Image (cartoon, rainbow, N blue to C red):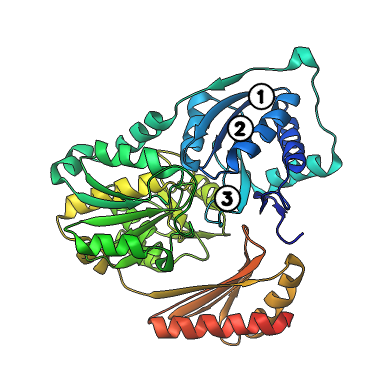
Amino acid sequence: MDSLMIGVSGIRGIVGTSLTPELLTRFALAFGTYLDGGRVVVARDTRTSGEMIKHSMLAGLLSAGCSIVDIHICPTPTASVMITELGADGGVVITGSHNPIEWNALKFMGADGICLSEEEGRRLLDIYYKGDFTAVDWSGLKEIEESDPLAVHVNKVLANVDAGLIRSKKFKVTLDSCNGAGSVITPQLLEALGCEITKIHCTPNGLFPHNPEPTFEHLEDLCQTTSAGNFDVGFAQDADADRLAIIDEAGRYLGEEYTLALAAMEILSSNPGPVAANLSSSRMLDDVAARWGTKVVRTKVGEANVAAAMQAHKCVVGGEGNGGVIDPRTCYTRDSLTGMALVLGLLAKRGKPLSVVAGEIPAYAITKRKLATSRGKVAKILAAVKAAARSATVNELDGVRLDWPDRWVHVRASNTEPAVRVIAEAPTAAEADTLCDKFLALAQKAVA
């Protein structure tokens, strides 16, 4: 079924169609077997399907001999923090992330709080497909604990910024949490930072008021609210609060690409060092890194790949251009709360409007498109893209990325949807649109 995606980064599907209790319980058995029992943190976002999925997971994990710490509804990065804080052996986050409400998914994490690597994911899939699961008898069944994780995560974020300076500025902030997992914890963080908050869609009921992907076309309410008042910044999260998009004081959508660049500016200003990002992230990050004489390590898309590169190269910050900031002082997972705190810290230090601070970063235009298609057709698309390279530099680390002196295009299979993503960056929006549309049409022709 095209709506079911099983891969090394986890599983995604449409609830009741491809994502069923039977499949979920088998995956829980596989993960429990992979961990050889052990202590597992279980978390979820606010989707109404989350409770059903959680109980399917609990049954499988308990049957495999695991003990469980249920931390209920919380962001994905909060789960990452708690895995390491509790010394757990791993974790499962039940979240469809930016996918529409009918979808849900499982993210599997190791004892380091990082999503499983490709090699680890393949080992888990091997157990799942073979069906050789551990199954304990009644005497081997362990308990389910409960823990409140929100204050732990908030305090870790606060420890990594000048909270006193930020509080002194009394920033006025708008917040759209899309009624997702960030709806409760994010106001707690912003209040701890002395912000005056106007909340939009911060009821954690899982009834999304718009598509949860924090892109321009989904954030009209936030942009209008921010432009209508005397606000300093607007923040938008996806359903599991690992991604952050930013609105400036005039209500202008800066977007997700600026999130990592601005966060990097704040960290590098006091702690210069290597930076990591995936191949689909903007060149803005390279310009920011160059200002402090450091380098950007490029990786395959996926936070586990970025986290691995950060550890290998001792990076001080990293992330992805989809609004995901990774600060290793908090956790090796994309974290919108960290992103907010770092941006507020930058504004507090600079004493200038966000539009002015963002304007110091060389501007590019980035266009993102996707083509719904089956996995079996991806190879044809990539071959067509590579054949059209001509004078470009070709990078095949993750799909095909073509680079020219002042622009690039990246075509790759999505990790989260049955689709191919086409992302292009160029000096102007018109040029980025043209480049992106050219390769989208090439992809469509390849599978026609």
Residue 408, percent across and down?
50, 77
Marks 2 & 1, CB-CB < 8 Å contact: yes
The N terminus, quarter of image:
bottom right
On the image, numbered disc 3 is attached to which residue? Answer: 96
The reply, left or right, for residue 12 in relation to residue 127 is: left
Q: Nearer the viewer, mark 2 or mark 3?
A: 3
Q: Is residue 70 above or below residue 303?
A: above
Mark 2, other Cα within 10 Å: few <14 / some 14–19 / many ≥20: many
Q: Is residue 216 visible?
A: yes
Asked whether 188 or 352 is in front, the reply is 188
On the image, numbered disc 1 is attached to which residue? Answer: 38
> What element does badge 1 sit on?
strand
Label 3 to label 1, Cα distance in Å?
Answer: 25 Å
Residue 446, percent across and down?
71, 82
Residue kind at label 3, given as amino acid type: Gly
Asked whether 233 or 349 is in front, the reply is 233
The reply, left or right, for residue 283 in relation to residue 93 is: left
